[in-house]
Image (cartoon, helix red, strand yellow):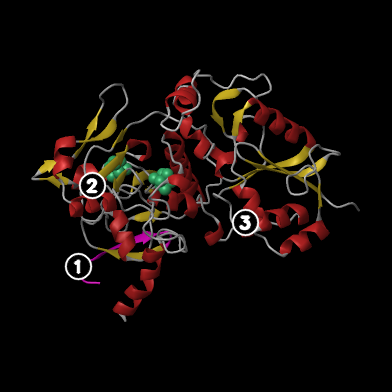
Amino acid sequence: MKGKIKIIIDGKECWAKPGQNVIDAARDNGIYIPSLCHVEGVKPAGSCRVCNVRIEGRNMTACTTPVADGMEIENDIPELNELRKAIIEVLFVSGNHFCPSCEKSGNCELQALAYRFRMMVPRFPYEFPIKGVDASSKYIYHDRNRCVMCKRCIRTITKDGKNVFAYSSRGGKHLHVVMDKELAAQMTEKEAQKAMDICPVGAILKKERGFYSPIGQRKYDTEPIGSDVEKNIDHLKQKEQ
Amino acid sequence: MSKPVIATTSLAGCFGCHMSFLDIDERILELIELVEFNKSPIDDIKTFTKQCDIGLIEGGCCNSENIETLKEFRRMCKTLVSLGECAIMGGLPALRNGIPIRECLHEAYINGPTVGLNKENILPNDSELPMILDRVYPCHEIVKIDYFLPGCAPRADLIWNALIALVTGGELQLPYEAFKFD
Ligand code: SF4
Ligand code: SF4
């Protein structure tokens, strides 16, 4: 493996590009590390903590940690999966996630992670907080009740070089993500679709697009999130041979 | 040995979970060989006549009657199962959580666009009516719930698997396709 360094994930030898982060290196080796905020090619934010792995006894976020030669990483172990499940449960109770009436249902990464970890019920009490909805723009519907503060939109969605989404603490001590009404109003249909696609949950929706695919044909209806990565292992093996 | 006894009820739900239960189709014949039904809309027995083994609860708690029924189920059933999103997290009725109750009632009976005949602006006040709660509560915030079956409605296969596991003491099979929140 020329120019590559060796890392060990759950006892398996993997090869990574120097400078690559652990989550991307794992993916290239057919190993799925669950995450909600990571977007390939975008500067990691480390905000959701779902990608927690254990490296030399310490919990680190796989998206912000670069690989190092000989690094030993624990990923798919009961203790970490339980921690991830707890984080997902916190996200469910601290927002308002009424999946049956959500247009993202079936294509939602938060829901898909809850399926993957078989969340029967969150162990924490539901908060039912009041968060706002901004439906002012022509193509975008922004429902903060479902926002998981992953910062994907903040890091990627711009209009004429300006950020459409930003953190705000307006009207209270809690931070939330708000949409710039003026910039959002100028967005095209295509840009709205891009914003919807980047949002892991149903917080950013493109108007008049809801319930587009029938039940049974949605992204996570038949296979758990991460299956594509895990299947890729065969592709990689074939490529090497 | 006598058969295990099942009771079911719909609190603040839409009866969708019960419909999904009936979606087990002809397996209901198999079920009736295995269990006996007590209080349930399925056989229309309206009051408990004995202690039961399994209670299936559809819907969360939105009024005082829901709370009473749920507590009665807890007393009368050895094992209680929250069936569906409404029982588990309040579901669509809980969309009103966070909105003051007065505002909800005014929207429904006085200011709503489809309110026409309520000329005297009366809010429901008959003493026969159960009291509406400040918000909708998931069942496990009111009594102890032993098991949870998500879905809106839970898939018939999930309900079937769960009943079989409970009745036979086996392990619950949770196939990915049958495990959904919608
Ligand atoms: S954003 Fe995802 S988890 Fe939240 S309600 Fe929608 S589908 Fe469910
Ligand atoms: S709106 Fe969506 S993309 Fe933006 S921070 Fe919230 S969950 Fe993430």
Asked if residue A217 can be seen in this view, the reply is yes
Q: Which residue is mark 3?
A: B158
Q: Chain of mark 3?
A: B
Q: Amino acid at mark 3?
A: Leu
Q: Residues within 10 Å of mark 1 (few under 14, many from 20)?
A: few
- Above or below residue A237? Residue B35 is above
Q: Chain of mark 1?
A: A
Q: Evaluate whether label 1 is on the same chain as label 2.
A: yes
Q: Is mark 2 within 8 Å of ligand 2?
A: no
Q: Was residue A128 drawn as part of the magenta stretch in this picture?
A: no
Q: CA distance from mark 3 to mark 1?
A: 50 Å
Q: Chain of mark 2?
A: A
Name the foreground residue: B87 vs A44: B87
Q: Classify mark 1: helix, strand or loop.
A: loop
Q: Residues within 10 Å of mark 2 (few under 14, many from 20)?
A: many
Q: Which mark is residue A139?
A: 2
Magenta region, residue range: A1-11
Q: Amino acid at mark 2?
A: Tyr
Q: Can you tell which of label 3 and label 2 is closer to the viewer?
A: 2
Residue B87 image offset from top left, x and y in percent: 59, 39
Q: Quadrant of residue A71?
A: bottom left
Q: Amino acid at mark 1?
A: Gly
Tally of numbered tags = 3
Q: Which residue is mark 1?
A: A3
Q: Classify mark 2: helix, strand or loop.
A: loop
Residue drawn at (56%, 58%), measured in percent from left and top? B178
Residue A205 lies left or right of residue B131; in this view the side is left
Q: Residue furthest right?
A: B1
- Work out whether mark 1 precedes mark 2 in sequence or the reverse, and give the earlier one: 1
